[in-house]
Amino acid sequence: MNKMAEPISPGQYMWLVAISVVAGGIYLWPQYLVTHMGSNGIYALFTTTAIAVGVTLLEVAIALNVGQPTFLASLRKILPVLGIGFVFPISVLVCLVTDAIILALYGHMMKSYFYPLTPILAVEVCIVGIAWWIAIRTLSAVARSVQFWFPIILLLLVIIMAFSSIHLRFLDALIPSPHFFIAPWLNSVASTWFLYANGSVVVTLTPHVEWKRPRDAYFTAAFAILGQGAVLLVFYVIGLATLGPNGVSHLYWPLVYIFSLVSVRTFFFKGIGAFVIMAWTSSIVLYLAVHMFCFAWSVTSDIRPPAAMLRWGVVAAAGGLLIGATLFVPSVVQAREVLFHWVTPATLLWTLLVVPVEWFLSTRYRRRNREEEM
Amino acid sequence: MRKKVVAGLLMGILTLALTGCWDQLSLADRASALVMSVKPASNHRLQWTFYFPNPGITLSSISNISSTQQFYTASTTAVSLGAAYQKVQVQLARDLYLGQLEDVVFSQDLPAQTVNRVINAYNRDGILPKTVYLLAEPTAVTALPTTLQEPVPTVYFTKYFECRKCQPVDLSQPAWQVWDEIHTPGISPVLPYGTQRPSISELLVYPTDGMPHLLNHSMTLGWAYLTNHIRKESLSFKVREGLVSMSGIKSHAKVKLTVKDGVLVARVKIHAEGALTQWPDNAAMTPRELKLVQSLASRQILHTCLRTIQFANQTRIDPFGWGRDYLFRHPQAGITNEKRRGMIWPIEAHIAVTTRIPATGVSP
């Protein structure tokens, strides 16, 4: 333990867990899902959310069973060699690659809709720069930033959604088809998992709350994930009810498109829907900051004394990795191909393989510890 | 201290970088088009005309100048929107800017495929506003209808469509909605048809391919009653004693759709409400008379709707979007209707119209 680990409140924990998922890639939602499943996309959304809740609960259990301050420290206890040399680097890497593609696509979206003449790299560097600035602070400082900004982001979204509700036209389009096909369902689940991929940051965050009862940790984490699932559901409804499944599947960024239609001509600022960009830029910044913070903390927490410069450097390295990876993204088409068909299914597979094993080993570790104590 | 310096530096750089103002351009250096018009030209090309408000017009001169002077134009022939943009840009000494576009006007003589192609290209560009109003005009019309009451050059179409209370029938078609209809099976997109007078009271319906069909004013009303686009319509008809008028009519249609033996069966219930504004002087208004007037109004609305549906069946169009609505409720049916882009004909309509006249003015 070091001075960074001053405890956070359950509320702060909830906001941190919530921002670590969905907030990054939300602007891509729900095009892929609707393209492959149409009005049956709702089933895939429920499935991914259920998997995410299950995985998060297992991660909370791992953290509580092992009782170590970070994900890496937990792995060291339950899987000494393989955990440090294999599981941790791969978990972090797949998450960072996902984040990098999400960031690259966000840059492309900004260029397409708002800054046609600004180089994408400038947008990406700015986002990573602010994320770095937040991520180099202490846990409670990061938690306070998220606790302050995330509700504001949600409030902004609610206001914009209220404005765009006048465009809701096709509530019938939400009715799922009685013909259910397994292949597109599995495909959609495997390809939209990137929304919930967070590189096990929950394991790092959970031990730093003074839980009254362990079950509070489970409830809070599940509530955060379900809350983000509800956001996805609301956006799914807005997308489908405004444009119908065919319209949504023909747009890369359907929600940005729908919110850009909000125009109040008599208002001083005509394109009020552009506020959504502020909301989403803030949310992607916090999302990246929480990921980078947890990874850097895991890496540096055991090095004593924990030099601030070292953490700055590790966060900067993670940020550099993100920026570097975006440079290899040549176009939206290729980035989407890689994200949906390669990185996301691989991340899901990895998560479903590794997290249950980690949980199993953590319960064994706990049992052994108890026996030793007795 | 060092942290504060770093934070200060970072904030400074971000403040400069994130405003996005490095590529700002003063208003005087921009040519901001308000209207774009697309017409057929020779050799499979299109004639593109951009209308720019004339900044030289002042409040004092506004009443003395003709509408043609309120706007200046730049025109070119090109195969695509991108090529037209380039060519017009070359003609102007300012940066051509389409971010303030308000209306896109298509010639009536353009086939559905061409209109779809232009709308698709327009929609692909993220910067172009998707809330612009689309409409169609006869090719011969060249001058832009303007509203002379405004202190600055204002396009009549934009002003009219934005004034929700001005329109007896809501015929506005924003670009995003038409683009969505092009991509959604089971609906024939419609565009309001503007004339030089200026007036907008008719619709052009675009079939899957080929030239558009004109819905005359009466059929446009039928379309509006069937699709809930009536805002404050009026009706006039004769009774034995003389002329009767109703105005401020609002209506609501409920549609139930089924498919039986390949026929789209639409059960429509329309309820209209309006005020009696004219009644023959020599006749007294009794409950019996009122009932008669209500039933005559219902009959007239019914006739208008049936005529529109008949026309849709004849020309194989579905401007009501009933095919789409049916597919939304029965997504599995889409597979069998792919060849007809989700449209189902013939449409067999069972329409019941009820009319209520709650207000009959101040005299019996």
Image (tube, helix red, strand yellow):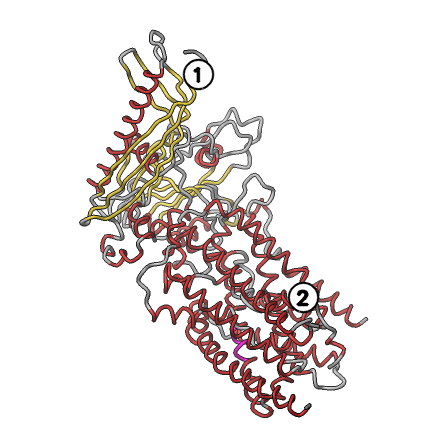
Question: What residue is disc 2 on?
Answer: A12
Q: Position of residue B277 (x, y in %)?
A: 40, 18
Of the pair B254 and B177, the residue shown nearer to us: B254
Total number of numbered discs in the rendering:
2
Tag shown at residue A188: none
Left or right, A73 with reference to B51: right
Q: Residues within 10 Å of mark 1 (few under 14, many from 20)?
A: few
Q: Residues within 10 Å of mark 2 (few under 14, many from 20)?
A: many
Residue visible at 63% across and 66% down?
A: A14
Residue visible at 68% across and 91% down?
A: A374
Left or right, A240 with reference to A147: left
Question: What residue is disc 1 on?
Answer: B361
What is the span of residues highlighted in magenta in the rendered image? Answer: A93-98
Of the pair B106 and B364, the residue shown nearer to us: B364
Q: Secondary structure under badge 1?
A: loop
Which chain contains the residue that carries disc 2? A
Farthest residue toward the right? Answer: B1
Q: Position of residue B193 (x, y in %)?
A: 34, 36
User: Relative to B118, is A293 above or below?
Assistant: below
Q: Looking at the picture, which amino acid does disc 1 mark?
A: Gly
Q: Position of residue A162 (x, y in %)?
A: 54, 48
Q: Looking at the picture, which amino acid does disc 2 mark?
A: Gln
In 3D space, how far apart are the residues under numbered discs 2 and 1 (Cα atoms)?
64 Å
User: Relative to B40, is A277 above or below?
Assistant: below
Of the pair A161 and B161, the residue shown nearer to us: A161
Left or right, B94 with reference to B245: right
User: Relative to A221, is B110 above or below?
Assistant: above
Left or right, A246 with reference to A279: left
Which chain contains the residue that carries disc 1? B
In magenta stretch: residue A295: no
